[in-house]
Structure formats: structure tokens, C-alpha cells
């Protein structure tokens, strides 16, 4: 009888240990699971300030967006929304995950994320994470806001963000 109870306890303990292990086939390195590219494409039907498409390829920047997605919380109720961006996550194998994404410019607002696989369910990206993504998007769009000025044989590129400074100089050929 005692042996039978010990055997049952041993089996239960083994089941418990097996349940605590990582499933077979999961990726132990989360960086490998990151997409290789995140593309934000402006929705032409979303009327707001000027919008620029953004491509994010840097793994650190991709990590910022993925962290925001992972922290998003499900919104209860039905959705009535207009998407600012179409977000596409491209994995290394070429597979795509598509979202509608609205983030706006207001640092006091969360962002809205809706997976294309189920457009009836929305997710709210916390304000802190939304602000990190806003800053990231802004850094990418600021790079494209440069003024080109030509003097003689020289071409100057002037950064049009807060301070107007020459950021690059090349000779015309």
C-alpha cells in the first residue's frame, strides 16, 4: 500500500515537473523571434496631420514596438475606429502579421491596435509604451524632413527640425 502511494506521488511529481518545462520547439532566445521588419503605412482615409510611412529594421527599435504590442490590453465592447496606419510585421521567413494601428500625437493617450485576423477585438497600448513608439516614429519621420539647398556646385541638406543646421554636404558632379 505504501509503495502504491509512493508511486502515485512520484508520477504526480513527474507530471508537475513536466508541466513546468518549456514546450518543445519554443524559442529560448526571444531576439530570434523578433520580426525582421515593421512597416507602418499611412491610411489615406484617415484625415489628420501629415503622415509619413515608416520602415523599422533596427532590432532594438523593433523590440520597442513588439514590447508595446505585448503589453497591449484587450478592450471590452465593440469597436468603432479608423486606423491611422496599417502595420505589417514581417518575420525572417517572410510570413506577415497585419494590424490596424492608431497612435496620434497626444502623449496623454494610449494607442489602439487591432489584429487583421479579428477586427472585432481591439487592444489598448499603455501610454508609456505608446509614447516610446511615438518617439520612434517621430525619429524616423524627422530624418525625412530635410531641405535641400544648392549654392554653385555644392548641395546642402538642412535639417528642418527645431534647429536649422547643416547635416550633410556633398559636391555636385
Image (cartoon, rainbow, N blue to C red):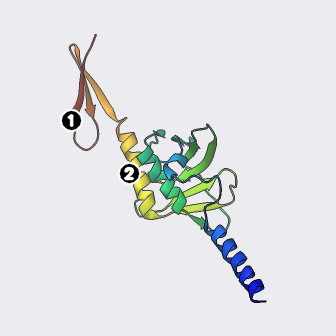
In this image, 83 relative to 168: left or right?
A: right
| Marks 1 and 2 close (CB-CB < 8 Å) | no
Which quarter of the image is occupied by the N terminus? bottom right
In this image, 91 relative to 56: left or right?
A: right
Q: Residue at x 70, y 55 (%)?
A: 118
Residue 126's label in the rendered image is none
Q: Residues within 10 Å of mark 2 (few under 14, many from 20)?
A: some
Q: Nearer the viewer, mark 1 or mark 2?
A: 2
- The residue lying toward the viewer, choosing from 93 and 11, is 11
Q: Could you tell me if residue 47 is visible in this image?
A: no
Badge 1 element? strand
- State the residue lying farthest toward the bottom: 1
Q: How far from the left and from the top, in percent, is residue 44?
A: 56, 40
Q: Residue at x 38, y 51 (%)?
A: 135
- The residue lying toward the viewer, choosing from 67 and 76, is 67
Q: Residue at x 28, y 10 (%)?
A: 173
Q: How far from the left and from the top, in percent, is residue 170?
A: 25, 20
Q: How far from the left and from the top, in percent, is residue 73?
A: 56, 66
Q: Which residue is mark 1?
A: 165
Q: With respect to residue 151, does 163 lie above or below?
A: below
Badge 2 element? helix
- The residue lying toward the viewer, choosing from 37 and 16, is 16
Q: With respect to residue 34, does 81 lie above or below?
A: below
Rounded to the nearest angstrom, the CA distance separating label 1 from label 2 is 21 Å
Query: Counting residues from the N terminus, which is met first, the one under dot 1 or under dot 2?
Result: 2
In this image, 34 relative to 116: left or right?
A: left
Q: How far from the left and from the top, in percent, is residue 58?
A: 43, 41
Residue 135's label in the rendered image is 2
Q: Residues within 10 Å of mark 1 (few under 14, many from 20)?
A: few
Which of the 4 image quadrants contains residue 108? bottom left
In this image, 149 relative to 125: left or right?
A: left
Q: Could you tell me if residue 114 is visible in this image?
A: yes
Amino acid at each position: 500500500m505504501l509503495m502504491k502511494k509512493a508511486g502515485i506521488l512520484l508520477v504526480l511529481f513527474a507530471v508537475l515537473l513536466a508541466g513546468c518545462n518549456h514546450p518543445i520547439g519554443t524559442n529560448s532566445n526571444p531576439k530570434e523571434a523578433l520580426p525582421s521588419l515593421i512597416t507602418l503605412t499611412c491610411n489615406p482615409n484617415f484625415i489628420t496631420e501629415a503622415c509619413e510611412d515608416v520602415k523599422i529594421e533596427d532590432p532594438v527599435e523593433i523590440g520597442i514596438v513588439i514590447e508595446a504590442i505585448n503589453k497591449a490590453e484587450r478592450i471590452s465592447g465593440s469597436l468603432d475606429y479608423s486606423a491611422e496606419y496599417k502595420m505589417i510585421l514581417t518575420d525572417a521567413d517572410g510570413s506577415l502579421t497585419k494590424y490596424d494601428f492608431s497612435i496620434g500625437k497626444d502623449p496623454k493617450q494610449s494607442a489602439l491596435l487591432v489584429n487583421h485576423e479579428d477586427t472585432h477585438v481591439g487592444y489598448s497600448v499603455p501610454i508609456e509604451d505608446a509614447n516610446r513608439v511615438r518617439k520612434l516614429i517621430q525619429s524616423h519621420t524627422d530624418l525625412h524632413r530635410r531641405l535641400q539647398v544648392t549654392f554653385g556646385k555644392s548641395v546642402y541638406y538642412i535639417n528642418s527640425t527645431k534647429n536649422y543646421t547643416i547635416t550633410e554636404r556633398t559636391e555636385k558632379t
